[in-house]
Image (cartoon, coloured by chain):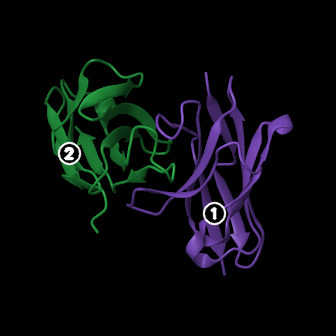
Amino acid sequence: DAGVTQSPTHLIKTRGQHVTLRCSPISGHKSVSWYQQVLGQGPQFIFQYYEKEERGRGNFPDRFSARQFPNYSSELNVNALLLGDSALYLCASSLDAYGGSTGELFFGEGSRLTVL
Amino acid sequence: AQSVTQLGSHVSVSEGALVLLRCNYSSSVPPYLFWYVQYPNQGLQLLLKYTSAATLVKGINGFEAEFKKSETSFHLTKPSAHMSDAAEYFCAVSESGFQKLVFGTGTRLLVSP
């Protein structure tokens, strides 16, 4: 079975541009979360979506937005890119809003964004 | 606010030696605690989790961790390191279940022959 898939795997943007990152959860998983991992640091929580509704938001500016589609896939959008947005963006899925019976988030390999 | 502190950004051990990675947490309520491993250019994989059941938690690949409330610690151990254990390890805490994790800054484990 396919795991969490993210696209694109790598991308380069310039300051002020907009970026859209995509995530397909494991089949049957209804919750998707997004994390930002800056080089040398641990991941930071950005958003959680469950059944197409936002269930949680981290301490990120309004330039960051996300949505979840009826097939439970998700997009993360970042507007007006800054140099500091350069990071690995990780998507994680789980069966339900609380991690499912195993209490586990399943992470994708991430999208590495470089802002020049 | 909840947080975790991982002592030591790098830990070096010899193959076959004991692995000890330290994690201390801060939480206003009984926490959920996790250890994740990240191999180069990969996402995170759950090693083990504490959810207020047994204080000694066994995970995958021979790792285990002990929850010590009096010390607010959740250190990760493995009796005998293997070369394949070389990776970045992250401790994480959550007060709301298995989502919205707060991660530490990570510890890179280096294993020498």
| Quarter of the image where one finds residue A84 | top left
Residue drawn 24% across and 26% down? A65
The purple-coloured chain is labelled B
Rendered colour, chain A: green
The N terminus of chain B sits in image quarter: top right
Q: Is residue B52 left or right of residue B102?
A: right
User: What is the x, y in percent for residue B10?
Assistant: 64, 55
Front residue of this view, candidates B62 and A38? B62
Image height check: is A16 above or below B94? above
Outermost right residue: B70
Residue drawn 45% across and 45% down? A99
User: What is the x, y in percent for residue B52?
Assistant: 70, 42
The C terminus of chain B sits in image quarter: bottom right
**Helix, strand or loop for disc 1:** loop
Q: As shown in the figure, which amino acid type bears the numbered disc 1?
A: Gly
- Give the labeled residue for mark 1: B59
User: What is the x, y in percent for residue B71?
Assistant: 84, 38
Estimate how packed mark 1 is, as few (under 14), some (14 to 19) or many (20 or more) residues with alpha carbons within 10 Å.
Answer: some
Image height check: is B10 above or below B16? above
Residue drawn 75% across and 51% down? B54
Front residue of this view, candidates A114 and B34? B34
Query: Which chain contains the residue that carries disc 1?
Result: B
- Give the labeled residue for mark 2: A73
How far separated are the C-alphas under marks 1 and 2? 29 Å
Query: Which chain contains the residue that carries disc 2?
Result: A
